[in-house]
Amino acid sequence: MADPIDPIALATQLINCPSITPASGEVFDVLERALDSLGFTIHRFVLGEPPDGPTENMVAIRGQGAPHFGFAGHLDVVPAGEGWASNPFDAVVEDGLLVGRGANDMKSAIAAFVAAVASVDQTKGILSFLITGDEEGYATFGTPRIIDWLNERQIKPDMILIGEPTSVDRLGDTVKIGRRGSVNMWIEVPGTQGHVAYPHRADNPVPRLARIIAALDKLHLDDGTEVFPPSNLEFTGVDTPTHASNVIPGCATAQLNIRFNDLQKGAGLVRTVEEIATREAPGAKVRARISGEAFLTPPGPLYDVVVDAIREETGLAPELSTSGGTSDGRFLIQLCPVVDFGLPNATMHKIGEHAAVEDIRALSRIYRRVLEKVVGPAPREMGRASLRYPGANSGS
């Protein structure tokens, strides 16, 4: 068994490396040093150019044989924003809280898993870390490229745990077993710019864009399923190139996002919006970017080990949920069963982001229990995790 690793100390080191998405460099150096000390073979590769790159990825592997248990996560963070009481990239512990950008989402979970690995005497199978520097961005050169790297080498995990902050009120109350898909779209309606006093010499695109917005606002996509909430379309922006009060704009644009369940496909939703836009405003253009399709991990051994580990450590029976936003599980599901489990998520992306020190330590103990069940020396009898979806319609 390796020397102990303090998850708080490692999380602090990671937070102290500014790694706004897409990330590369120093923050990966810190993680590499920790994993190298645990006997992992480290593979790092940087891909892409601005604006979606350069992005660094890491695959770290230890062991041989079966099973292959993967832990996935991201070292990139969202911009810190203004209004912090302390430097967001100089982690501090105050009143039992670790404060800094990435403390919640999700550098502390990565540190907790590294500490868990250091505490387990691995006697069988393979452990791997699949770590990207572009989860908070478009992931163009992130986890999809990790999957390419694995496929090229015919490396296939049997199960993957993602350390995203999934808990809501208490550590261990929620495990994400699937995620909705997401597609962003931009609608542009062309017109002819002119003076508002001479409308006959111009062509105002705003009323036509308004018709598109009204039609899409009335669109009913579905009623949801037993495990997923209804798909929802939300407008996130409306704009014209000029904001002058006496100018008819030459074009008008709207931006929207659809979060969708497994009754829908991203391409089909794009076609629906295109048809409505063309009907309401001939000549309108729609540009789309599908972030990922909806997915669901069916019941199986991965449910069992995670749920049992949570119950043993916290006494809670976690809710198995598909609520909230996307994660890199939307890509990793191509490889094997995937679930997300991590810290309470109330402060992710917020000013003053933080995580309770005791939650981080407890999370590391839960991860250790998972590892003991999968690759450790003393396999235990596992009860079947019941499928419970009472929170499918709750947000996180």
Image (tube, rainbow, N blue to C red):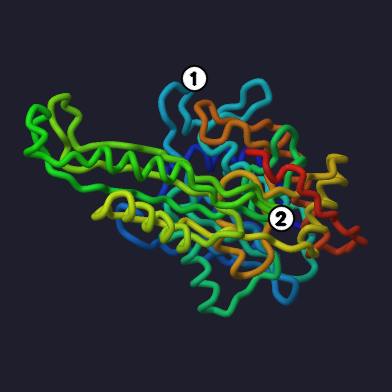
Query: Which image quadrant is residue 173 in?
Result: top right
Task: Name the residue rendered at 35%, 45% in the picture.
Answer: 212
Task: Name the residue rendered at 70%, 75% in the picture.
Answer: 64
Under circle 1, the secondary element is loop
Residue tagged by mark 1?
85
Task: Name the residue rendered at 58%, 80% in the picture.
Answer: 154
Amino acid type at image mark 2: Val
Residue tagged by mark 2?
117
Residue 36 seen in the figure: no
Q: Is residue 253 above or below residue 131?
A: above
Q: CA distance from mark 2 to mark 1?
A: 34 Å
Number of callouts: 2
Q: Residue furthest front?
A: 200
Q: Residues within 10 Å of mark 1 (few under 14, many from 20)?
A: few
For this rendering, which residue is in front, 36 or 16? 16
Under circle 2, the secondary element is helix
Q: Is residue 102 above or below residue 187?
A: above
For this rendering, which residue is in front, 338 or 220? 220
Residue 159, numbered circle? none
- What percent of the width, then of the height, locates residue 103? 58, 36
For this rendering, which residue is in front, 87 or 334? 334
Q: Say which quadrant the N terminus sits in.
A: bottom right
Q: Residues within 10 Å of mark 2 (few under 14, many from 20)?
A: many
